[in-house]
Image (spheres, helix red, strand yellow):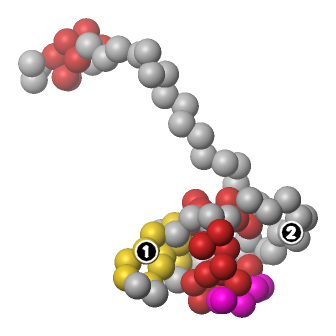
Amino acid sequence: MSTEARSVPSLDFERKPFYSTVDVAKIAGISDTTVLARIHSGELFAIQLGPRLYRIPLGALLQFLGGAPSIRKSADRRAKVNAKTDDPRDAAEH
């Protein structure tokens, strides 16, 4: 990931679940070629739908723009779930 400072553009854009590379380029004020370079370098997460077709989730876009913190796994791996005692609605199913 690049350590260079990036100015955060205005976060005033239409919120939707996924964005095209062209959408991200317009929002970030960079070229779509640069967006693809960031995807290939791993700096911007994207889902590849075809050989040259990518979609960027809202969360990844916000993180790329510096508008959201990194998403971390917060679940306790040692936690145990007991459906019979943890939730009465689940107990009825078991």
Q: Can you give x and y, in whole percent of width and height, for residue 72 in the image?
A: 59, 40
| Mark 2 residue type | Arg
Identify the image quadrant of the C terminus: top left
Residue drawn where x is 53% and y is 78% of the image: 19
**How many residues crowd around disc 1 within 10 Å: few (fewer than 14), some, or many (20 or more)?**
few
Q: Measure how far apart labels 2 and 1 are at the Cα level.
A: 25 Å
Magenta stretch: includes residue 32: yes
Q: Which mark is residue 78?
A: none
Residue at the image position 52 percent from the left and 83 percent from the top:
20
Read off the residue under disc 1. 48
SS for dot 2: loop
Q: In x, y percent, where is residue 32? A: 65, 89
48 sits left or right of 41 in the view: left
Q: Is residue 35 above or below residue 94?
A: below
Q: Which residue is mark 2?
A: 6
Q: Is residue 72 magenta?
A: no
Q: Is residue 3 visible?
A: yes
Say what amino acid the circle numbered 1 marks. Answer: Gln
Q: Height in image: 92 above or below 39?
A: above
Where residue 70 appears, as percent x and y from the top left, is: 66, 48
Mark 2 or 1, which is nearer the eye? 1
Q: Quadrant of residue 9?
A: bottom right
Which residue is at the far top?
A: 85
Occupied quadrant, residue 11: bottom right
Q: Nearer the viewer, residue 7 or 1?
A: 1
Q: Which residues are magenta?
A: 29-33
Picture mark count: 2
Please give the name of the residue rendered at 43% of the width and 15% of the height, measured from the top-left corner: 78
Task: Assign a secondary structure to mark 1.
Answer: strand
